[in-house]
Amino acid sequence: MSRLYAILQQVTHAWQAKDVDRVLDFMADDIVWHYAVAVMPPVRGKAAARKLLERFQADMHRIEWRIFAHAEAGDRLFVEGVDDYRTAEGRRVATPYAGVLDFRGDLIAAWRDYVDLSVMTQQKAGEPLTRQVLELLDREVAL
């Protein structure tokens, strides 16, 4: 297993446990996090990252964040995965995405997620997961 992917797995476990402090332990103080590249402005710094994580945490339950593929180039980690969880109302939200994480040592200094927020919005409104989304979810998780 690659070094950077092993760090991301620790982030994943912390997020599934809803441990915001532990997630932040893996981020540089000056992190720049583009949660939805080209759709939302990035959050800058740990304080802003905390606010975003706490906002997400309130509506994310039974989190099954999965990575299907990853590649490492120097201090950069590329991932393909899905954010899969239940809302407070019990609706399933499963959003495929690709992400790029830049590391400084063992800390995430920049994080860019490429995601179609309209998929998430439709599912939160109660629309069923589309066939193409379901097909993307039925894959083996990366080691």
Image (cartoon, helix red, strand yellow):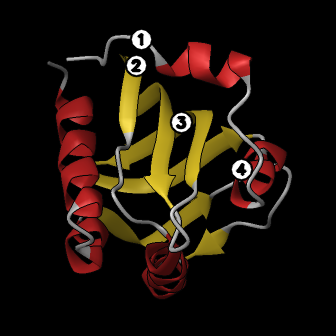
Q: Amino acid at mark 3?
A: Val
Dot 2 or dot 1, earlier in sequence: 2
Question: Which one is closest to the eye, mark 4 or mark 3?
Answer: 4
Instruction: Give the mark nearer the N terminus: 3 vs 1.
Output: 3
Quadrant of the image containing the C terminus:
top left
- The answer to whether 78 is drawn above or below residue 29 in the figure is above
Pointers 2 and 4 in contact (C-beta within 8 Å): no
Are circles 4 and 3 on residues that touch, CB within 8 Å? no
- Residue carrying label 4: 123
In percent of width and height, residue 16 lies at 26, 58
How far across and down, in percent of the image, does residue 89 sit? 56, 71
Which circle's residue, 4 or 3, is located before the other in the chain?
3
Q: Which residue is mark 3?
A: 100
- Asked whether disc 2 touches disc 1, contact meaning CB atoms under 8 Å apart, the reply is yes
Q: Are marks 3 and 2 in contact (CB under 8 Å)?
A: no
Against 42, residue 97 (above or below) is above
Which residue in the protein does label 1 denote?
A: 139
Q: Residue at x 46, y 75 (%)?
A: 53
The image quadrant that residue 48 belongs to is: bottom right
Q: Which residue is rendered at x = 77% and y = 46% of the image?
A: 127
In the displayed structure, does residue 35 sit left or right of residue 103? right
Disc 3 crowd rating (10 Å Cα; few below 14, some 14-19, many 20+) is: some
Mark 4 to mark 3 CA distance (whole Å): 24 Å
Residue 66 percent location from the top left of the image? 37, 34
- Crowding near pointer 2: few (<14 within 10 Å), some, many (20+)? some
What residue is at 14 percent from the left and 18 percent from the top?
1
Q: Position of residue 134 (x, y in %)?
A: 59, 21
CA–CA distance in space, label 3 to label 1: 20 Å
Q: Amino acid under label 2? A: Phe
